Amino acid sequence: MPSKPPKNKAPKGHHELAGSTRPRSSAAKLLGPLDSGEIVSATLVLRHKPGSPPLPDQQYWQSTPLGRRRYLSPEQYAEIHGASQDDLDAVTSFVTSHGLIVLASHTGRRTVSISGTAAQMNAAFGIHLNRYESPRPKPKRSAQATAEEESYSTHIHHGYDGYVHIPAELADIVTAVIGLDNRAGAVGLSESHSPAGSRKAAYRGHLQFQFFCRRRFQHHRQRQQHWLERLSDVLSLLATCGHRSRCFHDCAGSWERRRL
């Protein structure tokens, strides 16, 4: 069993991608290089379109009245905040030149999804993909782990050491490369495979859904109250102008009852 992975050698004209290192746990074991013919998928994340305005922050949503807030459609968001076609074309040209396949590209998400062999990924990004056996992140639980949970305490995944490298002409375009390291995330598989863990995960999902529904209800309730107040102002204005028709009084009474 190898103790140290080979060092990454950046191809000529390539730069280190900031934030692309994935330090391994001290308990992780290097099993050896990933088979050169194994298929690996990854996603490249691109920058926002040059010159695009900043996204609305929390201060904007808190200080802007409901009637003045601007909600973009997916098409409008892609046009204003998405990736430029020139950037997508540059990234596509780079990955295809290394024999990689473009699975999908999305302007709004600013992503290019690719697939290829481990050897092609190594050559394109100046890395050495290896196989590791790593411990899974342990979820917090009061009860002792069962035998079933213990069987999922480690997992085998592929990854790399050091930096991902990209061509100099893409240094300002590509912000991240995701998927070259597929180790388990923050919630271990052991939790989701145990009955108790499944109930906890389902309960968390239920709470998240309830929170989402509550926020949606509050939002629609506020909008309804906003328009009711505006309509009430219009009805009051009509009343002061002398429009005393029976239809007006019936309408005004109906809206006043709704407000209550």
Image (cartoon, helix red, strand yellow):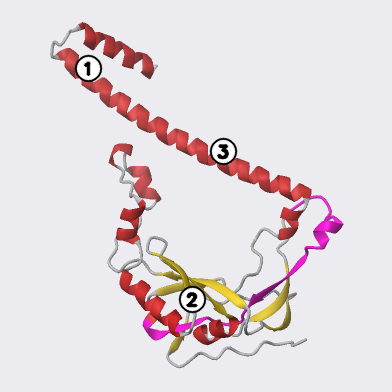
Query: Badge 2: how crowded within 10 Å, few (<14), some, or many (20+)?
Result: some
Q: Nearer the viewer, residue 68 or 34?
A: 34
Quadrant of residue 40 in the image? bottom right
Residue at x-position 29% and y-position 37% = 67
Q: Secondary structure at mark 2?
A: strand
Judge whether 169 appears above or below 25 on screen: below
Q: Secondary structure at mark 3?
A: helix
Residue at x-position 62% and y-position 45% = 205
- The circle drawn on residue 236 is 1
Which residue is identified by label 3? Answer: 210
Q: Is residue 86 magenta?
A: no
Q: Amino acid at mark 1?
A: Ser
Residue at x-position 13% and y-position 10% = 242
Which residue is identified by label 2? Answer: 101
In the image: residue 187, left or right of residue 121 = right
Q: Are marks 3 and 1 in contact (CB under 8 Å)?
A: no
Q: Which residues are magenta?
A: 140-169
Judge whether 65 appears above or below 153 on screen: above
- First-in-chain label (2 vs 3): 2
> Outermost residue toward the left?
241
Residue 196 percent coordinates (x, y): 77, 47
- First-in-chain label (3 vs 1): 3
- First-in-chain label (2 vs 1): 2
> Outermost residue toward the bottom?
12
In the image: residue 44, left or right of residue 197 = left
Q: Is residue 146 magenta?
A: yes
